Amino acid sequence: MKEDPWDNTNTAEWERQEVIGYFLLELEELIQDIVVKKPKAVGVSVHGSNRTLAKAFVKELRSRMPEITIVVGGYDCVYYEIGPYLFPDFDYMVIGEAEMTLEPLVKALAINEKPKDLTGIVSPYDSPDRKWVVPPLLEDLDSIDFPKYEWTNLMLYRTYNNNHFVPVAASRGCRWSRCRFCAECFPFRKRSPQKVTDEIEFMVSKGFYKFHFNESDVNGDPKNLYDICSEIIRKGLKVSLMGQLRIDKRNTREYFEHLARTGFVHLRFGVDGWSDNVLRLQRKGYTMKLVLENLRNCYKAGIVVTVNMVLGVPGETEDDVSEMIENLVQCKDYIAIEGINTLILAAGSEYYKHPDEYKIRFRGDKDEIYRNHPYYIPTELWYSEDPYIDQEVRIKRLDKICTKLYEQKVDIGSFAARVVENLKNNEKTIS
């Protein structure tokens, strides 16, 4: 396998049959234990990296226990139209968050029932004419406890080189939720500073000191994040913190200095558009002037600053590309580029839901393409007009940007470099 198979650019490792075969043997003891104990249901969390292995696991389990009920959930199950396409072998699929919808299913399974048409849950037992209703979300995040991982040895949760980054979430959803390319525009809810710091304090007591705020919008409520930091300082917790922030006018030098005193050592910003026109096209809600001020303030507070870019959105011009390069070079002394991504037409995004509004066209029948590709539309099947942009144009712009940034000695981080390499290799394969 690759040196770090858990790296975001190495997800293809988890689709290789020899890798699946190896880990399926590792799971044999667990499978045998399930067969002996005969539970009424088995729950599996599925996502992009474990999807293939999870399918093999479920197939093997069903071969030995044909009567077993399989309940799935997780990142692959965010949208009811997409989840069954990504992972079809299930009896019940919990869509999105489970706190408000899982209990009726568990109670029914406990008494050997096969319920149907449950709120927030998809099942082959559902009525043919069932109409999907968006399930409720938990509003009071403080009402549930944080995970303590009692079921395993916490030291197992480490990177390939024995680093430990404990995921912690101070919020769910995104306060802004308007970026046109984003497929994760969910309602924003937050936890209280006391609850968040209680979780961090618990993990510190177990010997962990590095934390990653594992959420879309860490500063969705800037005051709440500030108060979390104040509580960490008050408790005297010596920690190292990372996370992704949104560009915001309240991100002052003093604000970042407070975060730095708390232990924030690395902050990533989803700038995404790097010209004023592209920021408007992406509907980011801020200007390049504010972007540069935020990044400079963060750097001067002593925090490592990394940024993202989304390239090739409808309406983007060659002049925009030149301006992007100029803006990136302008702040080269205090940023590293962590992610460069060409636009993905992902289900759930504004571009995916309303392509005609953005002059997105398809190579083939649109309805058929959407039926065949409910997760995302392959790059070779769509393009945008005025100006004409397809994946070939995006790759050329990507190459131009990377070449210029290299010449100007702008730091392109290892993750961004691997993404660029993968995109170029894929483009060569397609052509």
Image (cartoon, rainbow, N blue to C red):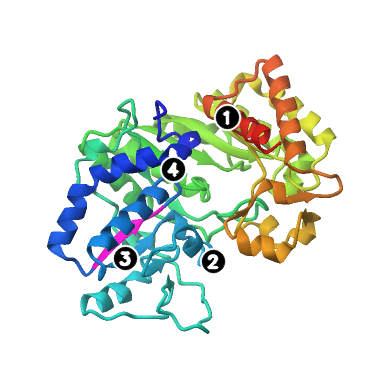
Report the magenta residues as a range. 41-46
Q: Is residue 97 above or below residue 282?
A: below
The residues tagged by marks 4 and 1 sit, at their Cα atoms, a distance apart of 22 Å
Q: Amino acid at mark 3?
A: Ile
**Visible in this render: residue 141?**
yes
Magenta segment's dominant SS is strand
Label 1: few (<14), some (14–19) or many (≥20) C-alpha neighbours in 10 Å = many
Q: Secondary structure at mark 2?
A: loop
Q: Amino acid at mark 1?
A: Ala
Position in image of residue 333 (x %, y %) = 62, 18
Numbered disc in front, either 2 or 3: 3
Q: Out of 118 and 258, give the one closest to the viewer.
A: 118
Left or right of 97: which side holds 325? right
Disc 3 designates what residue? 70
Q: Earlier in the sequence, mark 4 or mark 3?
A: 4
Q: Secondary structure at mark 3?
A: strand
Disc 4 designates what residue? 15
Label 2: few (<14), some (14–19) or many (≥20) C-alpha neighbours in 10 Å = some
Quarter of the rendering occupied by the C terminus: top right
- Using the rendered view, name the quadrant where residue 376 is placed: bottom right
The residues tagged by marks 3 and 1 sit, at their Cα atoms, a distance apart of 38 Å
The residues tagged by marks 2 and 1 sit, at their Cα atoms, a distance apart of 31 Å
Disc 1 designates what residue? 416
Q: Earlier in the sequence, mark 4 or mark 1?
A: 4
Disc 2 designates what residue? 81
Left or right of 16: which side holds 59? left
Q: Earlier in the sequence, mark 2 or mark 3?
A: 3
